[in-house]
Amino acid sequence: MNASLDVAWRTLTDYEHLPQFVPGLRSVRVLRRARAGGIERLLVEQRGEFRWLFYTQPVAVRMDVVHHAPTSVDARGVPAPGDDADHLEYFEGRYELEPVGAGARVRYAARIVPRFALPPLIGTLAVRQTMATQFDAMMAEIDRRGRAESAASMR
């Protein structure tokens, strides 16, 4: 990416604004923040949907998120009070960021196990398509913010 590591970090951790640019994400709420040493720990609740063609499945996850600024974000699902059927059974995800020249490289990996039944094949495609679309949107926003910051610094 042509955006700086700082821009990539600020975009990835801009939780409250994610639904504005990540498709399929309805809401994100930061329920708690705490700092200890160089680590920030958050409790984040996210609601959205998995989509593929005409198939849509609501999904929710409450996550324990650990920031190791500015190089990684680790998230794992935790039980939510009054867990509903839309919550994931298991979620673990990690963003890794590294500087590359004046830009940054962003990697994402996740393991997702839904609590709800997904149709065979279609369910897997819906999850993969949704995650790919969301990742692409996140990268596009990082790129957009990087260009805007570069343009502002040239004035």
Image (cartoon, grey):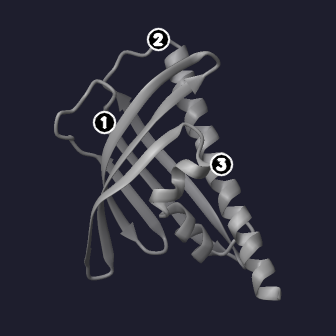
76 left or right, relative to 52: left
* Residue at left offset 53%, top offset 48%: 19
Q: Taking 61 as reference, is 104 above or below it?
A: below
* Residue at left offset 32%, top offset 72%: 40
Q: Which residue is mark 1?
A: 90
Q: Which residue is mark 3?
A: 137
Q: Quadrant of the C terminus?
A: bottom right
Distance, label 1 to label 2, CA atoms, is 18 Å
Mark 3 vs 2, N-terminal side? 2
Which element is circle 2 on? loop
* Residue at left offset 76%, top offset 86%: 153
Q: Which residue is mark 2?
A: 119
Q: Which percent across, then down, holds residue 98?
A: 58, 70
Mark 1 vs 2, N-terminal side? 1
What amino acid type is highlighted by mark number 1? Tyr
What amino acid type is highlighted by mark number 2? Pro
78 left or right, relative to 51: left
- The answer to which image quadrant residue 130 occupies is top right
Closest to the observer, 98 or 135: 135
75 left or right, relative to 133: left
